[in-house]
Amino acid sequence: MKATMKDVAALAEVGVGTVSRVINGVKVKDKTKVKVMAAIAELNYEPDEYARGLKTNRSNTIALILPTIWHPFFSEFAYYVEETLSQNGYKLFLCNANGNAEKEKEYIQMIKQNKVDGIIGITYSDIDKYVSSNLPFVSIDRHFSEPISYVTADNYVGGQIAAQELLNRNCKSLCYVGGTSPYPNETNNRKAGFYNVCEEKGLPVKTLDMPEPIQQLEQQLTEFFTNNLDIDGIFTVNDYMALDVIKVMKKLGKQAPTDYQIIGFDGVKISQERDYLISTIVQPIEEMAKTSVETLMAMILNEEPPKRVILPVFFHGGETTK
Amino acid sequence: MKATMKDVAALAEVGVGTVSRVINGVKVKDKTKVKVMAAIAELNYEPDEYARGLKTNRSNTIALILPTIWHPFFSEFAYYVEETLSQNGYKLFLCNANGNAEKEKEYIQMIKQNKVDGIIGITYSDIDKYVSSNLPFVSIDRHFSEPISYVTADNYVGGQIAAQELLNRNCKSLCYVGGTSPYPNETNNRKAGFYNVCEEKGLPVKTLDMPEPIQQLEQQLTEFFTNNLDIDGIFTVNDYMALDVIKVMKKLGKQAPTDYQIIGFDGVKISQERDYLISTIVQPIEEMAKTSVETLMAMILNEEPPKRVILPVFFHGGETTK
DNA sequence: TTGAAAGCGCTAACAA
DNA sequence: TTGTTAGCGCTTTCAA
């Protein structure tokens, strides 16, 4: 049978309140503390977090809501979120929402019923409507109109850097390839930053912006690049899109970085120890994860959290640029 | 203020016991049920899982212990575990242990304190020592001596298939490249299956088996392949090792599949919608995840779970074989 | 079919 | 500094 606080109290010949104080680090006479500790060790006592939660209304648990963990950007993010939480004595509920608003709602309900202390969310539905304002919530890469804190990489500057790096490498005909989501999100700033630099230099930019969900991607890409054979500098909304472009270009007989140069966005690594896939604008995923957790912790402790944090990106030169 | 069962009972003019019965689907007179449901809706009542857990000693939560979520094999596995659990009304604690026995132990303690109903573990320490025998535990790819259930892919047959596929493609000089872990695990069977076919055909096999953790991998690979220029058929313990071999071979001026052919193991996809990286023996990850959850569910319901499940693998011909 | 009440294991307020 | 106790919100037994 599992030992309870009562058992410990009896063995140590003290009241349960005293045991509780010892457990929670409240000041107790040294001698009593020793007795209690001995009893705890003897009985192999471990506090019941459910009883505790019932009283305190806290769970030391947070929920991470993602589209899918099966994607290196999200799994890297989750990895660091878990690591940071664990260091803070928090547990993590993993919630794959699959971009499904219904499932996000279900999770919100689960979260309420389970005294979850806060949420970190990378979501694309109007989740804010279901999150009550007193539940700490940090959004990633998504700016809600409500007073919800968010953490994001500097997408605009990332776009600027991409343009600059392509120009530095003598690209003459630039283009941007991306997708447009029905939900507003920060990735649009990548394009804006890219355009900004091009405009300043008075350079025209070609654009392939496909409405999401993207249908027949390969066909659209093939058509676009067949009609624009002069393009020699490409910036894509993310690394995956760059991979898709590379594949199509290969079929068209073009190879990076000799025939054209291409820069992605995200800085995806398929695992910690492996390399970036391509030349890319790297998001500081570890820092974003840590900042999210810290912001959430501040909210939980009723401190004033930053309303928005924008973290710097950097260029990684891989094998798809000269 | 959050509504409690008492509030619902008062509004519906019934006892709390009746409300509890309605919530839990115990038979109640239709008319009463309607009254209670109305009160629940009116008050926006949601049961408190912590109070419930305190009484029932169940949490509808399971823990997934992994080395790291930041790896496509594990994140795919986690993805399907989460999906299946969610369908069963279960929640998932994500535990990255980083191959760190200390952290695994910490997690076990957390699990005990939080009434976690069961564990799915991909672990490489002697975790079984800390898991009490009445806590449902399913191990992946690892065979404990204790009566612990495990789920694994058919690694032996996978090795056989790899050898066969290389031979079918006219490879004359085969080799195996892998690592040996201090902890026994099922991946050794990949090598064994590979050898088995080669021996049957009377073919010699070269071997590079490096003790883990592997130091100076690239150097070891370079040396090995420089000394064995005749090798034209390679089987590696996993997909990543194959990528490393490919990289080294490129530096040696060799290209797959023209100069040599190579088959990996795992069938890693960096995301659901992307392709396999190379020619490989594919593990049925989705099925493994589902089977693990089902086995765990059976244990939780005190049914007799299968002691071991070995699931079939298949060959995927990619661009690294002819 | 239902209501009343005990009690799960803990925290915190109060009293000593 | 410490013991006692009420009560967190539920489930479940017992009796009606």
Image (cartoon, coloured by chain):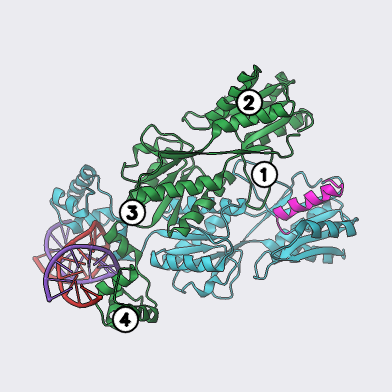
Chain colours: A cyan, B green, C red, D purple
Q: Earlier in the sequence, mark 2 or mark 3?
A: 3
Q: Mark 4 or mark 3: which is in front?
A: 4
Q: Which mark is residue B176?
A: 2
Q: Residue at x 64, y 35 (%)?
A: B264
Q: Is residue B215 visible?
A: no
Considering the image in quadrants, where does the C terminus of chain A appear?
Answer: top right
Q: Earlier in the sequence, mark 2 or mark 4?
A: 4
In the image, residue B111 above or below residue A217: above
Q: What amino acid type is highlighted by mark number 2?
A: Tyr
Residue annotated with mark 1: B276
User: Chain under label 3?
Assistant: B
Callouts 4 and 1 in the same chain: yes
Q: Residue at x 78, y 46 (%)?
A: A320
Residue annotated with mark 3: B115
Q: Does the stretch in magenta take in A293?
A: no
Residue annotated with mark 4: B31
Q: Which of the pair A253/B106 is nearer the observer?
A: A253
**Position of residue B275 measured from the top left corner of the image (x, y, whole percent):** 68, 47
